[in-house]
Image (cartoon, helix red, strand yellow):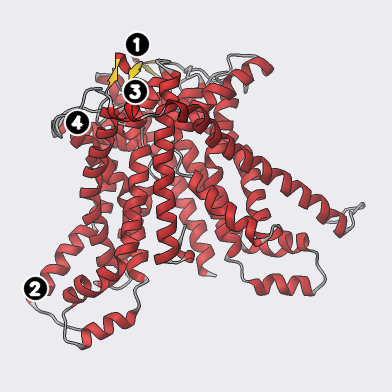
Amino acid sequence: MKKKFRLQPRAEQKIVQLLLYFLTSVAVLVLFFILAVILKNGLPQLSLEFLTKNPAHMGREGGIFSTVVATIYLTFIALLVATPLGVGTAIYLTEYTFEGTVTRIIRFGAECLAGIPSIIFGLFGFILFVNKLKFGWSILSGGLTLAFMVLPTIIRTSEEAIKSVPAAYRLVSYSLGSTRWQTVTKVVLPSAAPGIVTGVILSIGRSIGETAAVIFTAGSALHLPSSIFSSARTMSVHFYILAREGISMPKAYGTAAVLVIAILLINIITYYLMGKYIGRSSRS
Amino acid sequence: MARHKSGGDRLIRLSLLLVALSAISVLAIITIFIFEQGLPIMAKYGLKNFLLGQDWFPSEQSFGLLPMIVGSLLVTLGALVIGVPLGLASAIFLTEFSNRRLSGFLKPVIELLAGIPSVVYGFLGLMFLVPFIRKNFGGPGLSVLAASIILGIMILPTIISIAIDAIRAVPDSYREGSIALGATRWQTVRMVVLPAARSGLVAGIILGMGRAIGETMAVIMVAGNAADLPGSLLAPVRTLTSNIALEMAYASGEHRQALFATGVILFVIIMILNFLANLAARKQFRK
């Protein structure tokens, strides 16, 4: 391309630099604004009472205790199912096979699963768990749906963690006469554990923040769940309903602040662990 | 590699293989269920009516999804118009034009913000952006514009963090070569670094696009959700995802099947995007 009028390269650089500086400031300020608004309006709502009392009058009064409990139950079930599947997959991919058609199919499955929007998981969980398997709107249905949703995350982080265990460890273990399984369970997994935990924590964050997949599988009953077959409302769903139906903006802000603080804490822990145990390069 | 072919080892290998097939099996089951529920009604009323019909009146067997398809594409495009320039500019600035301390601080912070749940973005859109648009530009405020801006902000952290990784993956020797030839920093970035990082940048954009088109709750809160073709950027709009989420709670019979048909269309769009993203990402790694 030839232009008749051209800027001096240095002038051009100055202009571009200013433009980039401006755009970056906009992006960063907007993101900080979101955080600031939630904390500014939400923090004054927080108290021990808010966390330990059940919601009353559809959430207009009281706290969010039952939704915190529901969130913990759901997340726990999701990880109970997804962790063994994810770690098992990672062990198979890294320790028990060579790259080939099978591994390509497995990775393709995980990648595609990671790209499926949560509302599709919600639809699927609704048909399979709520309807066909007759679990109804329940903690179990919601937890299993979330398990499938976080599975790709756990596979990927576990794989990275296992790959970063030095090959020498394995060689030493084999040379001492251990079998492959002994090597995996006694040498590889213990060294990879912090990295695997990182993936699990990352998945906790995703489960806590999820709304679309949960609302159609776990329902939105406000009472304290009594078993895994009772319907329950998680914090995100509660927040969504409070805000969308205009029930109580102060309570919505309070719930949002709890959500955001919980997720930020989880992400900070994850980030710290990742930097420490998996190495920067594999972060994506 | 140890070559113990004992019975126990074979058993372990087999069970691990079964576990490893879980992800692809889940993918297969999801696909089968969504299609099984959605395809019959598409066949009954004709694919053309679903894709090109403009009227969504489920109680009168009118299942035109065109307004929602257009809605999804519009807000996704809007999100990219806002998110891509901001995201790429931030990534370029933080990697090539700022000092290490600033980028070392901002990159993790931006990645942390990626974890903020989408409902929170939607909520703030509802509280601040929607009234702002209503007051300054007219219309109901709940609009294509509001949804685009919220989604654009929501995908920012994704785009920034992947773009930074892609730019950092370009070897320093490329930059040194260009600078040594007398190019300015910006010329180096524009003519050497960005082309070299291109497929990674594209992968990041496509991933952000996938997030935008798949987002549900944030969009419901700010888009207005009228099932009509939007006449302007200030008109309300309904996306494919919102269509499912809004009506699933009470739909039954053919209406529910039509919502699954909505899911089928969304699913196909997402799969195409995934395929493109993988293609782009693979190109980068092969280098």
Label pair 1/3, CB-CB below 8 angstroms? no
Q: In what element is the residue under mark 4?
A: loop
Q: Earlier in the sequence, mark 3 or mark 2?
A: 2
Q: Residue furthest front?
A: A48
SS category of the residue bearing label 3 = helix
Q: Which residue is mark 3?
A: B45
Tag in front: 2 or 4: 4
The reply to whether residue B244 is visible in this rendering is no
Cα distance in 3D space between marks 2 and 1: 61 Å
Q: Is residue B266 above or below residue A95?
A: above
The residue that disc 2 covers is B8
Residue A165 to residue B4: above or below: above
Instruction: State the CA–CA distance, disc 1 to disc 4.
Output: 32 Å
Q: Quadrant of residue A221?
A: top left
Give the residue type at disc 1: Glu
Image coordinates for residue A88, horizontal then vertical, percent = 23, 61
Pinpoint residue A119: horizontal percent, then vertical percent. 36, 34
Distance from the alpha carbon under mark 3 to that under mark 2: 55 Å
Point out residue B143 in the picture as x, y percentages from the top left corner: 56, 21
**Label 2 with label 4: CB-CB less than 8 Å:** no
Disc 3 sits on a residue from what chain? B
